[in-house]
Image: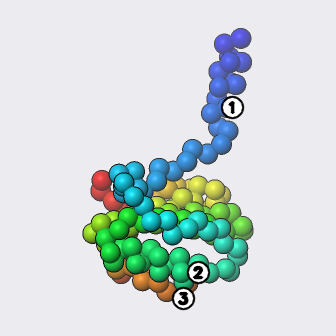
């Protein structure tokens, strides 16, 4: 009987992915500018307005959030959450655990120099967080 209970617990533990922790700056913020949540189709681009919302908040030192999910070539979702910081940098959390062909991990970086480019947001420099 003990073995069946253990097997059932282990089976249930594998059900559903645990959510990636949000960018740390969002957990501490009193007010957050919402720039939107977007699920893009294959080849679809992020709207200029969404990128400009995040860029504007970064320039003003406001805390803002933007979430973008894009499919891989095979159609697996990759979700990236961007959160601006009071110093104008952007915390970028990318979750590619649903991509069986990728590293299946969550990465966190702090980036500076955000720019709204033709194919979404780009940054002049990014580095892994040490927090």
Q: Is residue 60 visible?
A: yes
Residue 106 place in picture, x, y as percent = 49, 56
Q: Is residue 121 above or below residue 24?
A: below
| Cβ–Cβ under 8 Å for marks 3 and 2 | no
Horizontal and vertical percent position of residue 39:
65, 67
Badge nearest the viewer, 1 or 3: 3
Query: Circle 2 sits on which residue?
Result: 47
Question: Is residue 118 found left or right of 33 in the rendered image?
Answer: right
Q: Nearer the viewer, residue 83 or 16?
A: 83
Q: What residue is shown at x 66% (from left), y 72% (from top)?
A: 40
| Percent position of residue 91, x then y | 39, 64
Marked residue nearer the N-terminal end (1 or 3): 1
- Residue drawn at the location 51% of the way across and 50% of the way down: 20
In front: label 1 or label 2: 2
Q: Which residue is mark 1?
A: 11
Disc 1 residue crowd, few under 14, some 14–19, many 20+, Cα 10 Å: few
Which residue occupies the foreground of this view, 116 or 33? 33
């Amino acid at each position: 009987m003990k073995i069946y209970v253990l097997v059932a617990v282990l089976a249930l533990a594998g059900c559903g992915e645990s959510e990636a922790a949000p960018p740390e700056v969002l957990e501490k913020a009193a007010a957050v500018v919402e720039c939107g949540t977007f699920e893009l189709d294959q080849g679809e681009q992020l709207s200029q307005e969404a990128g400009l919302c995040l860029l504007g908040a970064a320039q003003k030192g406001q805390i803002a959030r933007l979430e973008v999910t894009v499919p891989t070539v095979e159609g697996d979702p990759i979700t990236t959450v961007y959160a601006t910081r009071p110093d104008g940098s952007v915390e970028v959390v990318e979750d590619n655990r649903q991509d069986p062909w990728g590293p299946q991990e969550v990465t966190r970086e702090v980036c500076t120099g955000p720019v709204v480019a033709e194919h979404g947001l780009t940054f002049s420099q990014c580095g892994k967080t040490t927090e």
